[in-house]
Amino acid sequence: MALAEPERGITNGAGSATPFSDIIELNVGGQVYVTRYTTLTAVQDSLLWDMFKKKAPTELARDSKGRFFLDRDGFLFRYILDYLRDQHLVLPDYFPEKSRLQREAEFFHLRDLCKLLNPKMSEDNSINDEICQSDSEEPSATPVVVGSDCSRTLSIASTVRSPSFESKKSGYITVGYRGTYTIGRDIQTDAKFRRVARITVCGKTSLAKEVFGDTLNESRDPDRPPERYTSRYYLKYNFLEQAFDKLSEFGFHMVACSSSGTCAFSSSDPNEDKVWTSYTEYVFCRE
C-alpha cells in the first residue's frame, strides 16, 4: 500500500525509491504546472533531471503553497514541458519567441532541443564556404560585385533572406490610454492634465509580443496562446510616442483613432473644479 508523501501531489508506488511524488506541482515564473516525475527526469543530465534526481525535496526552492519554484519564463515553459514528454518540438505556425525559447532550452541544458531551435554551426560554416569559394553554385538572388568583400556579400544575402523579415504577417494592433484632466473655475485658465496611467494593447498575442517584446506587461493575461487575441495587455512605460515608434519600426501605420470624454462627477457648486476622464484609442495596421 502506498504511503502518503509529505510532498505536494499524488504518492509514488510502493516500489519507488525516490523521495518525490509521482505527480509534481511547479510554479514557473508565477505559472502553475502539474506533471509527472518521470516527465521532469526524461532527459538525463538536464537541469530538471539534476534537480529531481540528485537533490532532496528539502533542497529545492518552494513558493508559499509548497510548489517547487523556478524563476523562469512561465509562458515558454509549456514548450519545454511538451518537449520533455516525447522529445519532439511542435510550435505554432507563427512563433516569434524562438530565440527566447532557445535561451530557456540552454538554461535547462536541453542540448537536442537547442539543435532543433538553431541550425548547427558546422552547417552554417559549410554554406558560407560554398558561397565565398565556389563558383559552380546556382546564381544567388543578390548580385555579386567582383572585388567586393565576401563577408559584406553574405551580410546582404542574410538580410534579404532574413526569416524575421519574411515571416512578418499582416494584422491590427490597437493602443489605448485613459487620462484625466481638470477644468478650473475660470474657463479661461488652461486645463490641468494628469499623466497617462496606463497604455493598453489589444490585438493578436503574437503580434503584440513581436512589436513590444519585454516592454509588454502580460500579468493580466499571462497564459494566452500566440494565435489568440487579447485586450488585457499593457505597456511598462507611459509614453505614447515610444509606443508609436515601436509600431512604426515594425511596419505598422495608423489607420484610425477615436476619443471620448466624460465628467467624472457633477456638483451644483459653481466654484468647484470639474474633473473629466478621457479614453483614446489608436488603431495601427500592417499590410
Image (cartoon, rainbow, N blue to C red):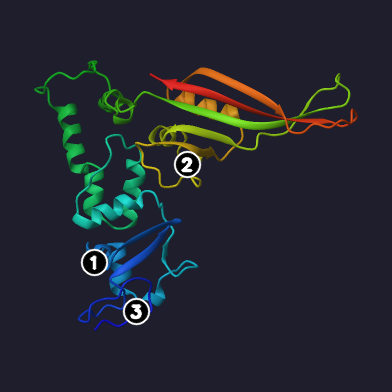
Q: Which residue is mark 3?
A: 5
Amino acid on which disc 2 is placed:
Asp
The residue drawn where x is 84% and y is 31% is 273
Q: Secondary structure at mark 3?
A: loop
Mark 2 vs mark 3: give the one in front: 3
Q: Residues within 10 Å of mark 2 (few under 14, many from 20)?
A: few
Question: Which of the pair 43/282 is nearer the observer?
Answer: 282
Q: Quadrant of residue 276?
A: top right
Q: Which residue is mark 2?
A: 214
- Residue 164 in percent (x, y) is at 33, 30
Amino acid on which disc 3 is placed:
Glu
Q: Secondary structure at mark 1?
A: helix
**Residues tagged 1 and 3 counted as in contact (Cβ below 8 A):** no
The residue drawn where x is 77% and y is 33% is 265
The residue drawn where x is 58% and y is 20% is 258
> Which comes before the other along the chain, label 2 or label 1?
1
Amino acid on which disc 1 is placed:
Thr
- Residue 133 in percent (x, y) is at 15, 28
**Mark number displayed over residue 38:** 1
Question: How much space separates mark 2 and mark 1, taking CA atoms?
Answer: 33 Å
Mark 2 vs mark 1: give the one in front: 1
> Which comes before the other along the chain, label 2 or label 3?
3
Quadrant of the rendering where the N terminus is positioned: bottom left
Question: How much space separates mark 1 and mark 3, taking CA atoms?
Answer: 17 Å
- Residue 93 in percent (x, y) is at 27, 35
